[in-house]
């Protein structure tokens, strides 16, 4: 079992090197720091099972590799989902005589955004209306960048589901340049 004092010493002695190692995997400083912190949290949570006589550094390295690969997988899925949403919105065709899109679609989008729950709505609004980066949102709300990405992905998924009947009309906004502020919410 690792005592608290031993853990603190281990953390101080290895954190910077472990961050550098995590960076070689994910190529993102903030994510590397989050991953390293999570590896140490996992070690602390398993402190009763871990013996200092074993190679703790190997344990941390393996933990960082696993967490880094999970991050990359999750990040790629988020990126692919956002690209898919953009391509879906960009490839819509205008139906003949459709003058429906002004008021009703804007109201539907506003209502859909208002239905987003708690931090999901806050993060989405900061991202799309305030133009903050994921890092800025994370700092503002004191959450991790991974959480910001998760909330944005969840918001986009919920909005796509809620606004499915309007997606063709929203695509028309893109094609004709009408209501670009509205469409930028999804990009």
Image: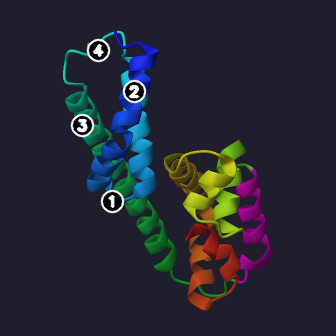
Q: Earlier in the sequence, mark 2 or mark 4?
A: 2
Alpha carbon separation for disc pair 3 and 1: 16 Å
Q: Position of residue 148 (x, y in %)?
A: 56, 51
Q: Position of residue 102 (x, y in %)?
A: 76, 78
Of residues 110 and 108, the one drawn nearer to the viewer in this rendering = 110
**Residue placed furthest toward the bottom:** 176
Circle 1 Cα neighbour tier, 10 Å, few/some/many (<14 / 14–19 / ≥20): some
Q: Which residue is mark 1?
A: 27
Q: Which mark is residue 9?
A: 2
Q: Residue at x 56, y 59 (%)?
A: 135
Does residue 73 lie above or below 183 as drawn? above
Query: Is 137 situated left or right of 42 in this image?
Result: right
Secondary structure of the residue carrying tag 4 is: loop
> Is 112 part of what is drawn in magenta?
yes
Instruction: Find out whether the residues at labels 2 and 4 contact each other: C-beta distance under 8 Å.
Output: no
Circle 3 Cα neighbour tier, 10 Å, few/some/many (<14 / 14–19 / ≥20): some
Does residue 23 lie above or below 43 as drawn? below
Q: Overall secondary structure of the magenta stretch?
A: helix
Q: Which residue is mark 3?
A: 61
Of residues 83 and 140, the one drawn nearer to the viewer in this rendering = 140
Circle 2 Cα neighbour tier, 10 Å, few/some/many (<14 / 14–19 / ≥20): few
Q: Earlier in the sequence, mark 3 or mark 2?
A: 2
Q: Which residue is mark 4?
A: 50
Q: Which residues are magenta?
A: 99-114
Query: Is 84 situated left or right of 66 in this image?
Result: right
Q: Earlier in the sequence, mark 1 or mark 2?
A: 2
Q: Earlier in the sequence, mark 4 or mark 1?
A: 1
Alpha carbon separation for disc pair 1 and 2: 27 Å
Q: Earlier in the sequence, mark 4 or mark 3?
A: 4
């Amino acid at each position: 079992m690792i005592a608290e004092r031993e853990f603190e010493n281990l953390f101080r002695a290895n954190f910077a090197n472990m961050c550098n190692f995590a960076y070689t995997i994910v190529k993102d400083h903030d994510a590397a720091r989050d991953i390293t912190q999570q590896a140490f949290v996992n070690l602390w949570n398993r402190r009763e099972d871990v013996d200092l006589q074993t190679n703790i550094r190997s344990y941390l390295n393996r933990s960082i590799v696993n967490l880094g690969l999970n991050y990359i997988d999750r990040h790629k899925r988020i990126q692919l989902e956002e690209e898919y949403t953009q391509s879906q919105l960009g490839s819509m065709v205008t139906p003949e005589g459709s003058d429906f899109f002004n008021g009703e679609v804007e109201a539907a989008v506003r209502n859909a955004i208002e239905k987003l729950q708690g931090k999901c709505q806050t993060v989405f609004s900061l991202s799309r209306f305030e133009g903050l980066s994921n890092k800025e949102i994370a700092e503002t709300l004191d959450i991790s960048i991974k959480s910001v990405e998760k909330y944005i992905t969840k918001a986009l998924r919920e909005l796509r589901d809620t606004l499915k009947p309007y997606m063709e009309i929203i695509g028309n906004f893109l094609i004709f340049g009408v209501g670009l502020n509205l469409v930028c919410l999804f990009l």
